[in-house]
Image (cartoon, coloured by chain):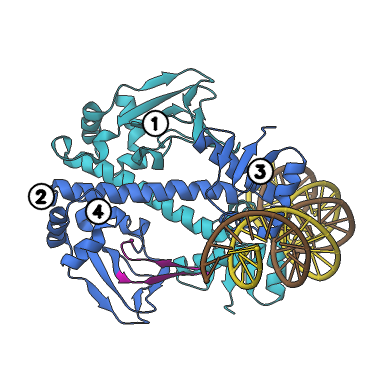
Chain colours: A blue, B cyan, C brown, D yellow
Amino acid sequence: MEQTITILMSSPLFAGLTKEEIEKILTCSATEPWQYPPGSIVLRAGDLLTTIPILLTGSLEITHGDGSSETIHPGQLAIPANALLPTRLTCTARTPDGCSLLCIDSSRILEPCSSVCSCHLRMTRNLVREVAADSVKNSERLRHLSKRSTREKLLSYLTAEAVRQCSDHIVIPLDRQQLADYLSVDRSAMSAELSRMKAEGLIDYERSHFTIYHK
Amino acid sequence: MEQTITILMSSPLFAGLTKEEIEKILTCSATEPWQYPPGSIVLRAGDLLTTIPILLTGSLEITHGDGSSETIHPGQLAIPANALLPTRLTCTARTPDGCSLLCIDSSRILEPCSSVCSCHLRMTRNLVREVAADSVKNSERLRHLSKRSTREKLLSYLTAEAVRQCSDHIVIPLDRQQLADYLSVDRSAMSAELSRMKAEGLIDYERSHFTIYHK
DNA sequence: CTCCTTTTGTTGTATATCCAACGTCTTTGT
DNA sequence: ACAAAGACGTTGGATATACAACAAAAGGAG
């Protein structure tokens, strides 16, 4: 229990809450952590979630129908947005090396009245904020990826970053490979495109420092 | 007021609420609708939202930094996810022909205690559900778009649809042009790719009916 | 039925992207 | 200072995609 709380304190879901408050929430609406042996399936596509699963120890591998997968680390929610929705899962979660999972009753999250205490509400706010932030990030990347050409994707990203940083001279937080992955293009092709854009006077750059010359 | 409520009843944000309950919410946490003349800027990039803006009449054009834009219709939230986050807007909203906007104090949405009545909570749940559903849809499309080739995008979409419909024979709700737009590829190129996939025995289809032959 | 519109499939060409391989320049560690 | 590793840029060839233009099929209105 003590250990569980220590892990949860570093989770964004419980940001701003004291140990005592977390403990109160746990006794109020969570079950004991569940242990899963190595290689076991934790969540199955088609399942209907009634709890919010939080990874305490070990790791989780989320696999989607198309074969793509991502790894979840301790403190993270297994499925952020699905936790707030009564929809069926479209992905499967497997733990390669075993894990323990804390499940918080999701009916307690947005339900009214009696069980609502102030620390409970703060967790709810954290969760909602998490999901909303995720949504904003996703829709931004979506706008970049929906561009057809590498050049358009780059300009879309760079101008978004310029808006965020309130300047036409920006410093990007990604190296070339990360940027290429983020925009879903080939690194070398992207590098080449950047050169062309620089040659044409559209932009200038040096490592992670970029300047955008609008039109 | 009466008119406002009629419009709101068709909004997903107020689903499941009676006229009386909506009225209660409005008097409790909304200001009078604001009118905007044709051509005026309603929201500006860099603004910090403190209210949830709902479009009552007219139309809103949301323009992003990259030049892309979308149109909002009456009853819809202007900026779903941003309403739940204290982040600065990265888009601008302009009304081409004028509009009226209802602004609900967002501090009332997730704040604790006194002002929380049961109908209030239902609106909050609706909003959160809206944002979460949006997030799920976005991250699904993102998985498709992050595939490099048209073929992979198609397979990613079709298998996701197969999981959703629990069958390898599926009916898709999009025509070819809509599907191409959704996957951000050229329609004719996509059509050609579909033919090749059919010729290679990967899939079969007839109009909107598809069958997937795994591997 | 015919005409018209819309949707879907096909083809050819110019162009863009991927991919692999290599060279240069930083950075890091010893 | 040196070697090793990593990041970045460049090039060329195979392939895929966009784009435009057209053909075929389906659906609707008269």
* Residue B98 shown in magenta: no
For the residues bearing labels 4 and 2, Cβ distance under 8 angstroms: no
| Magenta region | A57-77
Q: Position of residue B169 (x, y in %)?
A: 53, 72
Q: Which residue is mark 4?
A: A14
Secondary element type, mark 4: helix
State the residue in front, A122 or B6. A122
Q: Of tags 2 and 1, which is closer to the observer?
A: 1
Determine if marks 3 and 4 fall on one subunit. Answer: yes
Q: Which residue is mark 3?
A: A205
Amino acid residing under circle 1: Leu
Of tags 3 and 4, the one toward the viewer is 3
Q: Dot 2: within a 10 Å radius of its alpha carbon, few (fewer than 14), some, or many (20 or more) residues?
A: few
Alpha carbon distance from label 3 to label 4: 40 Å
Q: In the figure, B156 relative to A109: above or below? A: below
Do callouts 3 and 2 point to residues on the same chain?
yes
Name the residue carrying label 1.
B48
